[in-house]
Image (cartoon, rainbow, N blue to C red):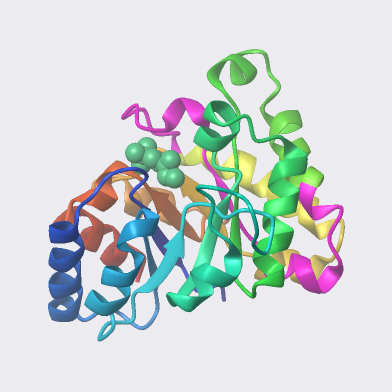
Amino acid sequence: MRMPLIAGNWKMNGSLTLVERFGEAFAEAGLSPSVEVCLIPPFPYLAAAQRALGGTPVMLGAQTLNPQHGGAHTGEVSGGMLREFGVDYVLVGHSERRALYRESDDDVYDRLLAALTAELRPILCVGETLEERDAGRTRDVVLRQVGAVMARLEPAQRAAVTIAYEPVWAIGTGRTATPEQAQEVMSEIRAYQAGFDRSLAEGMRLLYGGSMNADNAAELLAQPDIDGGLVGGASLKVDDFLAICQSAG
Ligand code: 13P
């Protein structure tokens, strides 16, 4: 069985106060051992989040990393630095980074490789735009994004990757993909992985992201190929995020 993972991507939101509030709420709530939870705050809050969540099973993630180990890269952060703050997961290829910071499939691959080298667990984000969906290109776009990375990895490296399917039109819009729409694409992603290795595909966790909230999480998570969620807006409200975590566990 695949252990569900609920990851809260704060994007460029949050505050030290919110970090403290999450620490207290998760310490009180006592999470089910049958769900993994990860909080992904902006870089400057990682140290405080490490402290605040120290007594809880909540893991830490980062929103991106630079492909290089270090050097003259003003403003950038390496995988090794993230490890020093207890970070386990790192997002790569989020659609906001692909669109706003022009990250190509090659950039995404380089970052994912750097994450693996630093012993971080990459969450590879993929998803089509509304235009691509309307043109009937969802499957092609998503499998291109998956293949551009996975086809270049060694088998052992593939096993360390989690994939998040986040349709761009569902992100921050309140327009969630229906469970059937999400399941359809995510079963294609798993089938693609099975082309490399069937047992790897069976064990690989696939997350859904895009306007997941406390009301729609259970229905999405009930789909056979949805093993968790990558939550944006609702991860900034502690009660909502806790409710989503509880509906997964
Ligand atoms: P929302 O949950 O706000 O739609 O964001 C999803 C997302 O982009 C998570 O990475």
Identified at 34% across, 43% down, the residue is 12
Residue 241 position by quadrant: bottom left
172 inside magenta stretch = yes
Residue 31 visible to the viewer: no
Q: Is residue 29 left or right of residue 34?
A: left
In the rendered image, the quadrant that contains the N terminus is: bottom right
Identified at 31% across, 30% down, the residue is 174
Residue 70 visible to the viewer: yes
In which of the image's four quarters is ligand 1 placed?
Answer: top left
Residue 197 position by quadrant: bottom right
Residue 149 sits above or below residue 103 on the image: below
Identified at 54% across, 48% down, the residue is 74
Q: Residue furthest bottom?
A: 55
Q: Residue furthest front?
A: 72
Q: Is residue 129 left or right of residue 69?
A: left
In the rendered image, the quadrant that contains the C terminus is: bottom left
Residue 13: x and y, percent? 27, 44
Residue 136 sits above or below residue 78 on the image: above
Identified at 58% across, 62% down, the residue is 78
Q: Is residue 84 left or right of residue 138?
A: left
Residue 175: x and y, percent? 36, 27
Give the magenta part as a residue range.
149-178
Residue 40: x and y, percent? 39, 58
Residue 54: x and y, percent? 28, 83
Q: Is residue 241 left or right of residue 224?
A: left
In this rendered view, identify the residue nearer to me: 125 or 200.
125
